[in-house]
Image (spheres, rainbow, N blue to C red):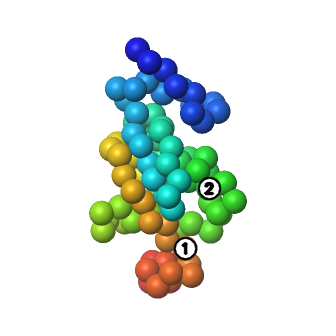
Amino acid sequence: MNQTNEHPGITTVAATTVHITINNTQGAFPKGVLLKEAIEHLLPNSSPQILCALSGGLCLELNQPIEADCNLTLITYQDEEGRRMY
């Protein structure tokens, strides 16, 4: 089994890895990683402003586990969708 340590503190195995892309930044994470944890690793300075993320038109909550590769659009209060949710 190939192990990678792309993110400190998170060890992944290739068969149980998901690839998450946020704002052209990609990372490999263990399957089931929480959305909030992925955001904190990929974009640590913006994580406090994030309300949720969109993936394929679906809203993902910050405490939702990510089970498959995805390309995310982050939503903040400055976005129209974010103001509607808040």
Question: Residue sitting at 30 percent across and 68 percent down?
Answer: 57
* Label 1 crowd bin: few (<14), some (14–19), many (20+), radius 10 Å: many
First along the sequence among labels 1 and 2: 2
**What number is the disc on residue 43?**
2
Within the image, what quadrant is residue 30 found in? top left
Within the image, what quadrant is residue 18 found in? top left
**What number is the disc on residue 52?**
none
Work out which quarter of the rendered image holds the N terminus and state it. top left
Q: Is residue 29 left or right of residue 59?
A: right
Is 38 drawn above or below residue 75 in the view shown?
above
Q: Position of residue 35 (x, y in %)?
A: 48, 51
SS of the residue at dot 1? strand
Q: Position of residue 5 (x, y in %)?
A: 57, 28
Residue type at tag 1: Thr
Question: Residue sitting at 62 percent across and 55 percent down?
Answer: 43
Question: Residue sitting at 49 percent across and 71 percent down?
Answer: 75
Is 11 drawn above or below residue 55 in the view shown?
above
Q: CA distance from mark 1 to mark 2?
A: 14 Å
Work out whether residue 36 can be spotted. no
Residue type at tag 2: Leu
SS of the residue at dot 2? loop
Q: Residue furthest right?
A: 45
What residue is disc 1 on? 76
Question: Residue sitting at 64 percent across and 33 percent down?
Answer: 8
